[in-house]
Image: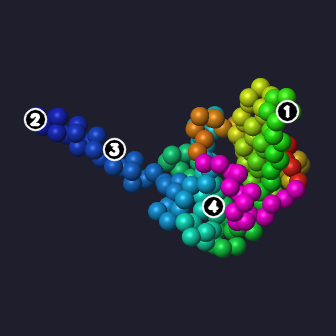
Amino acid sequence: MTERTNRNLIILLMLAFSNLIFAQKYLLPNEKLIYSFETQNGKKLVLAKDQNDKYIIYRFGTKNKIEFEFPEKTKESWNLFKYSFYLRGGGIQNEGMDLNYIKFINGDYKYVVHDTYYAVGNVNSILIKITNLKNNKTTDIRGKEKTQKGNLTDFRFNKLLEIEDEQEE
């Protein structure tokens, strides 16, 4: 190989390894994915838990930078998240639906992760709704359905999160 080819190969390898070194992990080695999806603007939401249920964590950001992580990784983290759902079977003839929500409050903002399905129209919707609690302004961050991994329905039975009756919109 020529000196120029070697130099280009070295640069290419350095770039590849720097991506691996500087890219932040959405899942740590001790964590298990609960739910994730990519957003329309190329970011990613990850909801994960410690494999031994020591904590639950929400992460959001790009492949190179986690922009928001909530909360601290402690046993008390489970008390900061709430789960709610509504299930109505019957398919299209009964306007069947399966609505699942995980919510938490951080400072003056309420975050609600939506995973909803409506039989009429066969419509899935995944998104993060962020509400400023001071002025009630909301921002919807829509997810790409085909990137969804995991589900929220296990919280109906696993007793890891408090189940609330209040439904989100």
Disc number lying in front (1 or 2): 1
Quarter of the image containing the C terminus? top right
Residue hosting label 1 = 95
Foreground pick, 105 / 12:
105
Give whichever of discs 3 and 4 has the lower sequence position: 3
Number of marks in the rendered image: 4
Write the residue at 30% across / 47% down: 14
Quarter of the image containing the N terminus? top left
Q: Are marks 3 and 2 in contact (CB under 8 Å)?
A: no
**What segment carries the magenta color?**
150-165
Foreground pick, 77 / 119:
119
Residue hosting label 4 = 57
Identify the amino acid type marked 4: Ile
Q: Residues within 10 Å of mark 3 (few under 14, many from 20)?
A: few
For residue 1, the mark is 2
Q: Give percent across and percent down for residue 4.
A: 16, 34
